[in-house]
DNA sequence: ATATCATTCAATTGATTCATTGAATGATTG
DNA sequence: CAATCATTCAATGAATCAATTGAATGATAT
C-alpha cells in the first residue's frame, strides 16, 4: 500500500530532481526557443560539451526533451509533454514566494515593471484593432526559427541604431524569450527613453507557441 | 547577464530540489488533505518524528506549506501559492511519459480504469441534474476536515458492511484524495461487483478545493 | 514556577550528484 | 574504406544531500 504509493512518488521525485539544477533549467530555456545542437547549447549555457551532453541526456531520460539526428549533429527540442506548463508552474510559485516575502500577495499591481507588461489575451485584442507594432528583440537566429506573426526583428544590441525601422506613431509591444528574459525589459527602457509608446509582452515566444497560437518561420538554417 | 540569469534559475532549482524526494511528496499529499500535526504526518508517512520535522521545514522554506500553532501542536497546511498546480503538472508529465513509453500519446481513451472516471466539470453538471450520490471513501478524519458538498462518508474498509446506506437507484460517484490515491479505485471495484452504477471522480478533494469550489466541514476536531 | 511533551536544532555518517578528463562510438564525407 | 568530427561513455575527486541520534527549545498545564 504505502509501498506502491512510494514507488509512484519516487517517479515524481525523479522528475523533480531532473529539474533541480540551474544548468539544466537554463538548457531547457534555450531549447524552448527552438531546436539546438549540443555544441550550440553548451556554448549558450557556458558548459563544456561533455557536461552539457550529460545534462541533456538526463533531460531526455525524464522526457523533457527529445532528439533528432541531422547529419553529424544531434538536435535537441522540447518534449511533447506539458513541459512548458511545468516550468511556468515553477516560475509562478517562485514569484508567489517573492511576493509573499514582501508581504503583498493578494495585490496584483505591485510590480512596477509589470505596469509595462501586457498579457497574451490583451495583445491579441490589440492586434485585431491594429496600430500595434510587434517587436522581437531576440537574436536573429532565434527569430528565424520561429516568431509571432507579423513581428519585426531587431536584436537588442542593434536597437539603438535601428530606431528608424520603427513606426513613429502607434504602440510598440516588445517580447523576447519569456518572463525571466531580460531582453524585453531592456527594450522598454531604451525605447521609453526615446519617446516611444512601448510595453512588453508578459510571456515570451515559448509560451505563445505552447498556447497553440500561430507562429511564423523565416527561411534560414 | 548569465550571472543574473543563473541566479534566478538557482532559485527555481531549489524549489524543484525540495520536491525531489518521495518522502516530501508523500508528506505534501497528506497535507493537501487538510491540516495535520507533525506527529500525525510522521505516522502517516512512516517517518521518525525528527525526520518528518526536517522534511516539513524544507517544504516550509520553499513556501509549499505553512504552519500554525494550536496548543502544544504545530499544524501544517498547504501554502497559499499554486502548490497543487505544480504537483498536478508533475503528475501530468509523469503520466505523459508513461503513455509515451507505451506508444500511445494522442489517444486519450487508453486507460481502461479511466473509463470509470468522471471529470469535475461533468460532475458539476450531473449534480445539478440530480440523481447522483457523492461518496467520500476517505477516513472519517479527513472527511471531517473538509469534503464535497452533500457527500456521504463511508471509509473504504467499512464499505462492504454499509452498503445499505447507499441509494438503490441512481448513480454513485466515488472520490478520495486524488488521481494517485487508490481508495476510489477500490470503491468502484467493490460497488461494481454489487451491481451499483458507480464511477470515480478523476481528481480528488484537494484539487476540488484548489479549484475554488464549495467545501463542507463537519464539526469534529 | 516547574513539569511535561511536541517539536526543532545540531552533528555525524553514508550515499548521491557534479564537473572534469580522456577515450570510444557512430555517422558522414572524400 | 579511411578520415573526420560531433556526441556520448566511463572513471575520478570534490561537493552536497539524506537519515539518524541525542540534546535543546518553547508552549501549555498542574
Image (spheres, coloured by chain):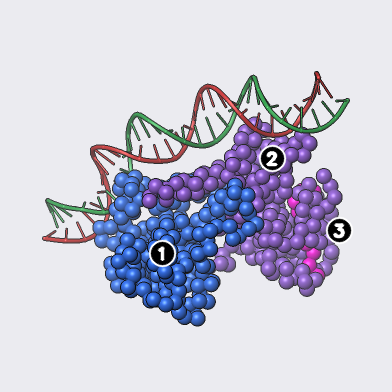
Chain colours: A blue, B purple, C red, D green
Residue B41, numbered label: 2
- Residue A103 is a magenta residue: no
Q: Can you say which quadrant of the picture contains the C terminus of chain A?
A: bottom left
The chain ID associated with circle 3 is B
Q: Position of residue A124 (x, y in %)?
A: 50, 75
Is B217 situated left or right of B116 in this image? Answer: right
Q: Nearer the viewer, residue A115 or B84?
A: A115
Query: Residue at coordinates 83% horizontally, 60% vertically from top-left?
Result: B166
Q: Which residue is mark 1?
A: A193
Q: CA distance from mark 2 to mark 3?
A: 33 Å
Q: Is label 2 or label 3 in front? A: 2
Q: Nearer the viewer, residue A54 or A205?
A: A205
Q: Position of residue B120 (x, y in %)?
A: 68, 65
Query: Residue at coordinates 42% horizontally, 49% vertically from top-left?
Result: B4
Q: Is residue B197 visible?
A: yes
The chain ID associated with circle 2 is B
Amino acid at each position: 500500500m504505502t509501498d506502491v504509493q512510494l514507488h509512484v512518488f519516487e517517479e515524481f521525485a525523479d522528475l523533480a530532481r531532473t529539474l533541480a539544477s540551474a544548468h539544466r533549467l537554463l538548457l531547457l530555456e534555450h531549447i524552448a526557443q527552438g531546436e539546438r545542437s549540443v555544441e550550440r547549447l553548451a556554448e549558450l549555457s557556458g558548459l563544456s560539451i561533455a557536461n552539457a551532453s550529460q545534462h541533456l541526456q538526463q533531460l531526455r531520460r525524464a522526457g523533457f526533451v527529445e532528439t533528432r539526428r541531422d547529419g553529424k549533429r544531434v538536435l535537441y527540442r522540447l518534449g511533447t509533454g506539458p513541459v512548458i506548463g511545468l516550468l511556468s508552474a515553477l516560475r509562478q510559485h517562485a514569484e508567489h514566494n517573492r511576493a509573499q516575502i514582501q508581504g503583498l500577495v493578494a495585490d496584483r499591481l505591485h510590480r512596477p515593471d509589470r505596469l509595462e507588461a501586457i498579457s497574451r489575451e490583451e495583445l491579441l485584442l490589440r492586434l485585431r484593432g491594429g496600430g500595434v507594432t510587434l517587436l522581437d528583440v531576440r537574436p536573429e537566429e532565434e527569430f528565424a526559427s520561429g516568431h509571432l506573426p507579423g513581428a519585426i526583428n531587431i536584436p537588442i544590441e542593434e536597437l539603438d541604431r535601428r530606431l528608424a525601422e520603427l513606426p513613429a506613431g502607434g504602440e510598440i509591444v516588445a517580447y523576447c524569450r519569456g518572463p525571466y528574459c531580460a531582453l524585453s525589459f531592456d527594450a522598454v527602457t531604451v525605447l521609453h527613453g526615446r519617446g516611444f509608446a512601448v510595453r512588453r509582452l508578459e510571456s515570451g515566444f515559448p509560451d505563445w507557441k505552447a498556447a497553440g497560437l500561430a507562429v511564423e518561420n523565416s527561411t534560414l538554417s
